[in-house]
Image (tube, rainbow, N blue to C red):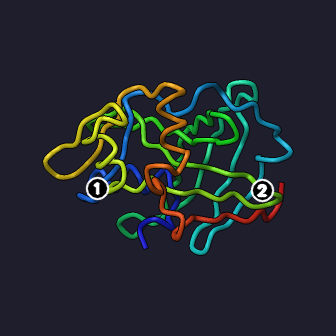
Amino acid sequence: MLWNRGWWAVLIIAAICGCTTVTSVAPVGERPQELSPEDWAGTWISKEQPIKIRVEEPRQGLLQVAWVEEKGGRLQFDSYQVELRAAGEWTFGNVKAKEGPAPYFWALVKNDEGQIIIWSPDPAQFRKLVQTGVLPGKVDQGGDVVLEKLTPAHLKAMMSGDRGVCFEWRKPLVFFRLGK
């Protein structure tokens, strides 16, 4: 499954391969999430792929996430900077896109005692929220959603659950820590 290859890479690949996405013109979240290297740094594994995480700037919520994948019959190293931002009790992971209609791909992230859980935004739900004016943004002809900069009130509306479930709760990507 495309989603299990690493959410940062998958979101970018989704934009290329035609899967519908939810992106943002600015990082999602109110402020940088201060990080503890003890909680984040190390080797993690999902159902299909191991990754290595390094905390680059703890006060700015910046991680470097790296993995090896096969492309064209060759193993290749890939890496992205992930910016974690907080809004209330929620943490959002943001990855700057290398190309596409909006600069940031993002997801809801939780680090919970040796596991990192990632939920992708549900494009159908975000389409409704944008089309009804609850969230600022636009929906393109292919169904992709591009969010404008979200205020704390927008984030609260999105996370409250009052307007439906905005994330793929049934399909999280879960990484388990193998070592530091």
Disc number for residue 112: 2
Disc number for residue 143: none
Quarter of the figure with the C terminus: bottom right
Q: Secondary structure at mark 2?
A: loop
Taking 127 as reference, is 165 left or right?
A: right
Residue at 61%, 47% in the rendered image: 65
Q: Is residue 12 above or below residue 175?
A: above
Q: Position of residue 104 (x, y in %)?
A: 42, 36
Give neighbour class at mark 2: few <14, some 14-19, many 20+ (Cα, 10 Å).
few
**Residue 38 sits in quarter:** top right
Q: Position of residue 26 (x, y in %)?
A: 43, 27
Residue at 24%, 36% in the rendered image: 138
Q: Secondary structure at mark 1?
A: loop
Q: Which residue is mark 1?
A: 20
Q: Is residue 3 above or below residue 29?
A: below
Residue at 70%, 40% in the rendered image: 89
**Residue 124 sits in quarter:** bottom left
Taking 158 as reference, is 21 left or right?
A: left
Q: CA distance from mark 1 to mark 2?
A: 29 Å
Q: Position of residue 31 (x, y in %)?
A: 63, 25
Give neighbour class at mark 1: few <14, some 14-19, many 20+ (Cα, 10 Å).
some
16 and 174: which one is in front?
174
Q: Amino acid at mark 1?
A: Thr
Q: Residue furthest front?
A: 162
Residue at 59%, 68% in the rendered image: 49
Taking 68 as reference, is 1 left or right?
A: left
46 and 30: which one is in front?
30
For the residues bearing labels 1 and 2, Cβ distance under 8 angstroms: no
Q: Is residue 165 above or below residue 104?
A: below
Q: Residue furthest left?
A: 141
Q: Amino acid at mark 2?
A: Asp
